Amino acid sequence: MSCPLILHLQDSLEYWAYFRFCHHNRPFGKLAAKRTQQRLSLISRHLDQRLPLPELNTPFSTERNSLAPDDLEYKPIDRSVPSSIPPSPTTPSSSSPPPKMSSQAPHNTLLIPGPIEFDDAVLQSMSHYAESHVAPGFVKTFGETLSLVRKLFQSSNPAAQPFVISGSGTLGWDVVASNLIEKGENALVLHTGYFADSFANCIETYGAHATQLKAPIGERPSFEEIEQALKAKPYKIITITHVDTSTGVLSDIKRVAEIVRRVSPETLVVVDGVCSVGCEEIAFDEWDLDVVLTASQKAIGCPPGLSILMLSGRALETFKARKTPPASYYASIGNWLPIMQNYENFKPSYFATPPTQLVHALHTTLSQITARPITERYAIHRHASDRVKAAVAELGLKQVAATPENQAHAMTAIWLPEGLAPPDVLPGLLKRGVIFAAGLHKEVATKYIRFGHMGVSVTDPARSDIDKAIAALKEALTEAKQAKGL
Ligand SMILES: Cc1ncc(COP(=O)(O)O)c(C=O)c1O
């Protein structure tokens, strides 16, 4: 006998109860039939709770404040903070936990300014079994991850919205350029290195005009210059690279935001925080920022592949007031906003498949980072940076970032001695198990190298990455000079 319920009941005890009812109700007699009917009624009530399945939300059906019914038990993975998270830098190191064995294969220490070395727990959380991106367990992980992003940005304003999208940091530029500015409108791009050129390029790709305010290499535009530029014509957005990874120049985004609000309050303040989020201070609400875009692979300490953004209510209103549709499909805020809102409210949602394993890794690293006061993390990075910069000075070398207030705390760009180029020094470092990056600023790329000191390499007291790198740099330089007869 065929029965429509069979499809739903297959492989379950309920199926067998129903099967027996259909085929054998006569031998059981009336009593047996009654019992089976009661059982069936129970089954159908059970099925009623499950069916219809929670609505799959599309960008067109956002129900921010309701929870999807879900009677599957959520079993969170143990993401307790590992004992390797160090005490505050002021605490004597004698109280540090004993060194632990890493579960990673032996490898050279990656000290470029991103991607960086990873914590074992972050890597392990990526080897998560396959799961649906709309299953309750993953929905919960993603929802929590978005809340952790708010914490990372010190933001509690409900009008602001975090976004986590599959892609790299560059995708953040596309999100800004295709949603927050329209064809023919103006962007003021503060230039402190290579990444401002690229951001300006991206803005122009979508038809807006990018005016670059350039500083000499190693410096940043002055506050007076920024104020004058803002007074000269209306700008829809101003972009600031918080730390330009090509030069190690740090910008004062708090001061720039203050100037913008005073001089040109309508202008959106857009921060490229790819090389700063997770190591340099950012107070999203307090500093009245509109966009901070970043990526997973630098001071956040997660493998590459996630574009992470925080948008203010003002930025979202600007998007909603567009005269023309956004110029991108995948990067459209209109497509992503309801998805992020749904996940944050633990509702399954779909626009494009999220990278589930990477989201687990991000959840783990953000849980670790936010388990301690974020100010402590900034202090640890400042402390490590001071050590590196003092060692560089001791070697008689200068930094590309010219003055202490312009210098980033998660990387150092180091001018090489006259007569040496990156290929003379980097192999010597590699021989000693350390990987630095070559120069990137196109005008001077052959004259300097870059040392990244962020994430676990500075926060995990069980690692000696920084000491090892300083020693390797000293030896590799001596060797390179000897080889060149300098
Ligand atoms: C400051 C800055 N902005 C943007 C990017 C682009 O990010 P991604 O390479 O992840 O696309 C980078 C990459 O290093 C960067 O350092």
Image (cartoon, rainbow, N blue to C red):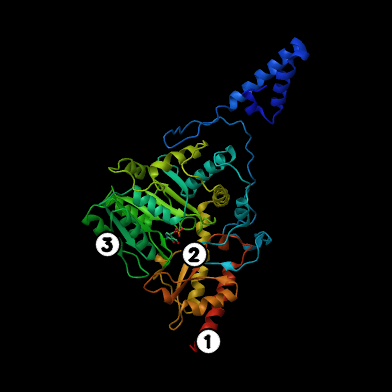
Ranked by sequence position, the earlier of labels 1 and 2 is 2
Q: Is mark 2 within 8 Å of ligand 1?
A: yes
Q: Position of residue 414 (x, y in %)?
A: 45, 73
Residue occupied by mark 1? 483
Mark 3: which amino acid? Glu
Q: Position of residue 273 (x, y in %)?
A: 43, 56
Check contact, mark 1 vs mark 3: CB within 8 A. no
Mark 1: which amino acid? Ala
Residue occupied by mark 3? 225
**Dot 1, crowdedness within 10 Å: few (<14), some or many (≥20)?**
few
Residue occupied by mark 2? 113
The picture quadrant where one finds residue 460 is bottom right
Check contact, mark 2 vs mark 3: CB within 8 A. no
Query: Tag on residue 193?
Result: none
Is residue 486 shown left or right of residue 237?
Answer: right
Which residue sits at x=42%, y=41%? 337
**Dot 3, crowdedness within 10 Å: few (<14), some or many (≥20)?**
few
Q: Is mark 3 within 8 Å of ligand 1?
A: no
**Dot 2, crowdedness within 10 Å: few (<14), some or many (≥20)?**
many
Q: In the rendered image, is residue 78 in sight?
A: yes
Which residue sits at x=57%, y=38%? 135
Mark 2: which amino acid? Pro
Q: Position of residue 278 (x, y in %)?
A: 49, 55
